[in-house]
């Protein structure tokens, strides 16, 4: 089933998104901060969010009334 592979991919992306969120919180709490690294991680997190939304829309497309 194509939906099961999409759901699996969606779960993996959501997990990576959560992991990045945790890493970013930890990095921002440290005194020595690498702003470039944080910027890259935030960009990756946004890309993941877009992919997650895309896959969710494939599974449950918006119904236009």
Image: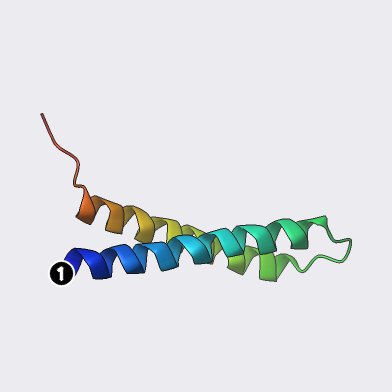
Seen from this angle, which residue lies furthest left? Answer: 65
Quarter of the rendering occupied by the N terminus: bottom left
Quarter of the rendering occupied by the C terminus: top left
Give residue 8's position: percent from left, percent from top. Answer: 33, 68
- At horizontal 85% and vertical 61% (from top left) the residue drawn is 30
Q: On the image, numbered disc 1 is attached to which residue? A: 1
Question: Which quadrant of the view contains residue 32?
Answer: bottom right
47 horizontally vs 61: left or right: right
Give SS at disc 1: loop
65 or 35, which lies in front? 65
40 horizontally vs 50: left or right: right
- At horizontal 24% and vertical 66% (from top left) the residue drawn is 4
Give residue 48's position: percent from left, percent from top. Answer: 44, 62
Seen from this angle, which residue lies furthest top? Answer: 65
53 horizontally vs 23: left or right: left
- At horizontal 82% and vertical 56% (from top left) the residue drawn is 29
Give residue 57's position: percent from left, percent from top. Answer: 24, 51
Question: Which quadrant of the view contains residue 42?
Answer: bottom right
Give residue 24's position: percent from left, percent from top. Answer: 68, 60
- At horizontal 21% and vertical 56% (from top left) the residue drawn is 58
Q: Is residue 44 above or below residue 59?
A: below
18 horizontally vs 48: left or right: right
Q: What colouring style does the render use?
A: rainbow
Q: Is residue 61 above or below residue 24?
A: above
Seen from this angle, which residue lies furthest right? Answer: 31
Q: Residues within 10 Å of mark 1 (few under 14, many from 20)?
A: few
């Amino acid at each position: 089933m194509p939906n099961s592979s999409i759901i699996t991919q969606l779960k993996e992306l959501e997990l990576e998104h959560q992991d990045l969120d945790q890493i970013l919180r930890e990095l921002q709490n440290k005194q020595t901060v690498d702003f470039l690294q944080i910027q890259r991680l935030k960009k990756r997190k946004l890309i993941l969010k877009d992919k997650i939304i895309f896959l969710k829309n494939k599974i449950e497309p918006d119904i236009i009334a």
